[in-house]
Image (cartoon, rainbow, N blue to C red):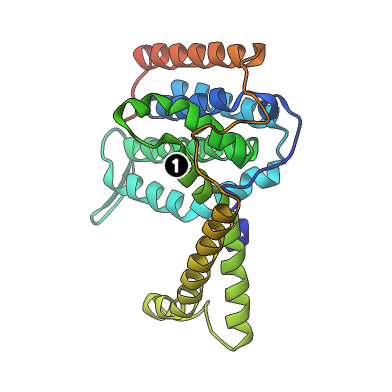
Amino acid sequence: MVRDITFGQYYPGKSVLHRMDPRMKLAATFGMIIVIFICKSFPALGLMTLFTLVAALLSTVPLKMILKSIKPVLIILIFTAVLNVFYSKGGQTYFSWWKIEVTEKGVNTAVFTVIRIIALVVLSSLLTYTTTPTMLTDALERLLSPLKVFHIKVHTLAMMMTLALRFIPTLIEEIDRIMNAQKARGADLETGGILQRAKALIPIFIPLMVSSFRRAYELALAMTCRCYTGGEGRTRMKQMKLAGRDIACLVICLIVLAGVITLNIFFKKVI
């Protein structure tokens, strides 16, 4: 399971999404995430699902890698679906026994919610798959630059967010290495009840925390030795410029937004 977590990783490529301006990708991703939550009907969600599939195809990221980004949230998907099936009431009754009742609204809400979460995870993963950490930092800094008016250190904030994102794959590898080392020493991490499994994770989290703090200290020391001072007077080797593909992406996103709003008006709302 740990090896299946691919969020935060970058997949090299030369696709349209890889060559897009990172500022536009970041803004479009957050905008489309909002649009996902605006969807209230199945046709509207279907339009967003189509948009997500097209984006995944244009990214040229392997399907196996995209599916791996969904696998870690599989338990959440199942739990959410079961919760909605049994607690949402309304419409035709499909199954009834004792206090358990499965209705049309419960099934529709469960399917709707699962599709919404999957689209959310895939869109978020595509952003990191197609954008390097350096470009992501620059994009965050540019988009958050208006906050400088309130004397907020935008570069430091963007750097912190990007470093946290960058070290997700590193921490995952560290967890996998520590788990294998504990198993080699006879630790049982896969059997027993919930409390036993929770206790078995203690020998994993303690060395992980120690390793994380050591890695953070080494990173801070390396930045200090290289005279890193932040964003003031900092130049960039690669300048970000909007191109025709970025404008096309903005237009497509606006069309999808208009389509979602229209479909919500003319079709029956699920939630």
Nearest the camera: 134 or 172? 134
Q: What is the quadrant of residue 240 in the picture?
A: top right
Question: Residue 88 vs residue 134: left or right?
Answer: left
From the top left corner, tell me how far across and down residue 90 is, in percent. Answer: 26, 35
Question: Residue 78 vs residue 184: left or right?
Answer: left
Question: Residue 255 vs residue 169: left or right?
Answer: left
Residue 95 visible in the displayed image: no
Residue 163 visible in the displayed image: yes
Nearest the camera: 191 or 172? 172
Number of callouts: 1
Residue ID at (60%, 41%): 133
In the image, residue 136 sits, relative to residue 95, either above or below, namely above
Residue ID at (51%, 41%): 121
Q: Quadrant of the C terminus?
A: top left
The local secondary structure at tag 1 comes to helix
Nearest the camera: 257 or 27? 27
- Residue at the bottom extreme, as displayed: 186
Q: 10 Å neighbourhood of mark 1: few (<14), some, or many (≥20)? A: some
From the top left corner, tell me how far across and down residue 135 is, in percent. Answer: 60, 34
From the top left corner, tell me how far across and down residue 70 is, in percent. Answer: 55, 47
Nearest the camera: 153 or 252? 153
In the image, residue 229 sits, relative to residue 236, either above or below, namely below
- Residue at the left extreme, as displayed: 99
- Residue at the right extreme, as displayed: 14
Residue ID at (53%, 31%): 233
Residue ID at (26%, 40%): 89
Q: Which amino acid does label 1 sit on?
A: Thr
In the image, residue 55 sits, relative to residue 99, either above or below, namely above
From the top left corner, tell me how far across and down residue 190 is, in percent. Answer: 53, 77
Residue at which label 1 appears: 156
Q: Quadrant of the N terminus?
A: bottom right
Q: What is the quadrant of residue 246 in the picture?
A: top right
